[in-house]
Image (spheres, rainbow, N blue to C red):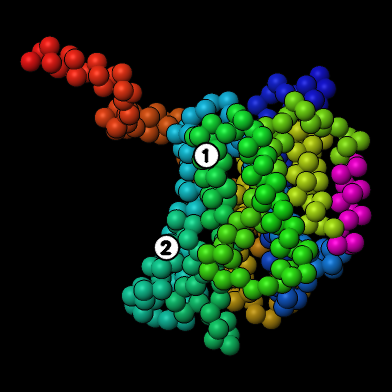
Amino acid sequence: MTLQDRLVFTSFRGPGFDQIRLVAATIVLLHHCRGLQYPDIQIDPLHHYSGGYMDFGRFAVVIFFAISGFLVAPGLVSNRSVVDYAVNRTVRIFPGLIVNVVLIMLLLGPMLTRHSLTSYFTDPQLYRYAKNILTLTNDYLPGVVAPDGNPLIVNGALWTLHFEVLCYVTLAVFGVVGLLKRRGFFLAFWIASYAIYIALNMAPAIKGQPFEGRLDRLLTFDSLFVYFGFGALLYLFRERIPFSLPLACAALAVLLGALPLGGGPVVMPICLPYLMMFCGLSVLPGKVPLKYDLSYGVYLIHAPILLAFSLTFPNMHIWWIGAAVVFLVTLVLAYASWIFVEGPALSKKKVVSNWAHRCLKSIIPPLRTRTPAQTAATERIGNMQS
């Protein structure tokens, strides 16, 4: 069976997506660990190569978004149940996030704070940190500060979850109104977001302009949705898009050639998702089997471990030594997260989905809109009974 055959007739899980996501999570970890040695972690080799357009941390994040768009779209197209889709996304994202936030508040925070435990647990800032459970980012805990007294970001990786949820909601809206089946509408929406993205990154009058508040959040969403959306489009147009090694090599060549010339915003939202889907669907990454998907755990857990390491060993400035320690500790905790939290939660998604359907059945029928003919018939029956 060819790769194209496998693309059309399988569930689109692919043998290599878990491996790619674990690599992407590890890249984020390494990117953050560079801060032990280099104060400005944004200045990395990819940042230099791309002329300031992309660093390795952002590169790994957009890989996550592209793969996510490709893998979650089938749940709406084939199953056509927004309830099942919402349950699956909720069960995948929130159990691990809730446990992560609670343990940081109750265990890691008290270990790292300069405040007394009484002061720590009575500080309103502690409970504001719980907003992270809803993907409403709050970065700080009371008394968790640098040696110079400045507050430290506890888990900077959490900011992306809010935008990932927004991408899920956007796709669900298209599914509810039936526009995923009319995929041209979704393509038009993506083209509009792509045009905005290019303008923000390349138009001299817009590039580098400061944006604040809701507009800044909207533009950040757009910068991530172009990857998520193109991943979804690769699924929606799967019978028209050949996934082949020559095209993958061409996409890689275009990407490597365009980045140093300033063309990253134009080619990367298209070439990178195609490359990731090709690799995820190919056999080669799947030759390194992964029994558990540890990528989400590594992504959630690594930043607080790095924070604890940097405060415990403030004179450690060799970043790769810190990265090795942080990676090993994070991997163990990610394994525990999968065994005790994420895996059990995912095993219950069918149960949760059935429960959600039962709850909705008791709510929706009374609210169901009647046609004029149904209303007239009901009135006739009522008149005859009276």
Task: Indicate whether residue 173 is drawn in magenta.
Answer: no
In this rendering, does residue 362 appear at all? no
Q: Residue at x 64, y 73 (%)?
A: 210
SS at mark 2?
A: helix
Quick check: 313 above or below 16? below
Q: Quadrant of residue 273?
A: top right
> Residue 386 has which mark?
none
Q: State which region is magenta.
A: 249-262
Residue 257 magenta-highlighted: yes
Q: Is residue 15 toward the left or the right of residue 168 in the image?
A: right
Disc with the residue nearer the chain's start (2 vs 1): 2
Q: Residue at x 57, y 50 (%)?
A: 164
Q: Which residue is mark 1?
A: 172
Residue 160 at x, y = what percent? 59, 57
State the residue in front, 22 or 111.
22
Q: Which mark is residue 130?
A: 2
Image coords of residue 44 (percent x, y): 80, 68
Q: Position of residue 21 (x, y in %)?
A: 69, 46
Dominant secondary structure of the residues highlighted in magenta in the image: helix
What is the crowding at mark 2: few (fewer than 14 residues within 10 Å), some, or many (at least 20)? some
Q: Position of residue 283 (x, y in %)?
A: 80, 32
Q: Please tell me which residue lies in front, 284 or 72.
A: 72
Where does the N terminus fall, quadrant-wise? top right
> Is residue 125 in sight in this rendering?
yes
Is 168 placed above or below 313 here?
above
Q: Nearer the viewer, residue 71 or 366?
A: 366
Q: Is residue 343 left or right of residue 377?
A: right
What separation in Å lies between label 2 and label 1 (alpha carbons)? 26 Å
Residue 244's place in the image compared with 216, above or below, is: above
